[in-house]
């Protein structure tokens, strides 16, 4: 299985970079992982709806350049479906069983994803109704993907 994580912005905090690197290393035995960072736009404080739409559109264009027609795209979105770790593991397993060999996860910037990217997504996934920093979500997503592979392999990590 090939998995891409497409995220807006660079990870500046060392502890997040270290965590991401650790989960990427662990995932190496289960899948081919590629982490893609696209440049984020600076969002002014108290930006109008129009300015926010423009920012999301620019970031969306950068994301779209990396989306592949043959990939199953999962967008992280607050209005997406919430799954337990076991349900998430089953989803990844089912995709593989039904011939999907490439999954692309998309994490938007601080104001979310452009509507065009959300429409392109095959699935919308939400980790919570709460808002999390998009940089932190990259590490949380990698941990959950790793957990899913451990669950699917019947290994004890998830207990």
Image (spheres, grey):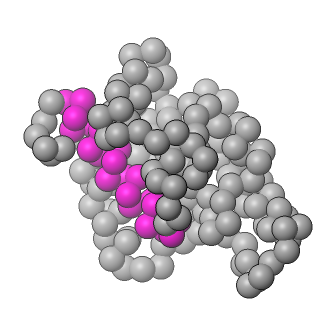
Q: To which quarter of the image does residue 46 belong?
A: bottom right
Q: Is residue 59 magenta?
A: no
Magenta-tinted stretch: 133-153
Residue at 46%, 42% in the rendered image: 82
Q: Is residue 139 magenta?
A: yes
Percent from the top left, x then y, of residue 103?
A: 50, 35
Work out which quarter of the rendered image holds the C terminus and state it.
Answer: top left
Measuring from the top left, give residue 34's x and y in whole percent.
46, 49
Q: Is residue 17 visible?
A: yes
x then y, percent, for residue 108: 62, 58
The residue positioned farthest toward the left in the image shown = 156
Q: In the image shown, does 12 or 131 lie closer to the viewer? A: 131
Would residue 62 be found to the left or right of residue 3 on screen? right
In this rendering, the answer to whether 123 lies above or below 129 is above
Q: How many marks?
A: 0
Q: Quadrant of the N terminus?
A: top left
Residue located 41% across and 39% down the image: 83
Q: Residue at x 41, y 28 (%)?
A: 91
- Is residue 58 something that shows in the picture? no
Main secondary structure of the magenta stretch: helix
- Residue 94 placed where, x, y %? 40, 21
Q: Is residue 49 above or below residue 75?
A: below
Q: Point out the residue furthest to the front here.
A: 129
- Residue furthest to the bottom: 45
Q: Is residue 29 above or below residue 15?
A: above
Query: Which residue occupies 57% across, 43% down?
Result: 80
């Amino acid at each position: 299985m090939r998995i891409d994580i497409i995220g807006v912005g660079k990870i500046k905090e060392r502890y997040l970079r270290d965590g991401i690197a650790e989960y990427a290393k662990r995932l190496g035995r289960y899948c081919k992982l590629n982490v893609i960072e696209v440049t984020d736009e600076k969002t002014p404080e108290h930006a109008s709806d129009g300015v926010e739409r423009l920012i999301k559109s620019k970031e969306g264009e950068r994301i779209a350049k990396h989306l592949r027609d043959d990939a199953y795209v999962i967008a992280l979105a607050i209005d997406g479906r919430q799954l337990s770790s076991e349900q998430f593991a089953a989803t990844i397993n089912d995709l593989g069983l039904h011939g999907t060999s490439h999954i692309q996860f998309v994490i938007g910037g601080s104001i979310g994803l452009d509507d065009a990217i959300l429409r392109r997504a095959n699935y919308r996934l939400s980790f919570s109704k709460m808002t999390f920093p998009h940089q932190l979500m990259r590490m949380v997503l990698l941990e959950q993907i790793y957990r899913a592979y451990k669950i699917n392999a019947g290994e004890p990590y998830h207990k």
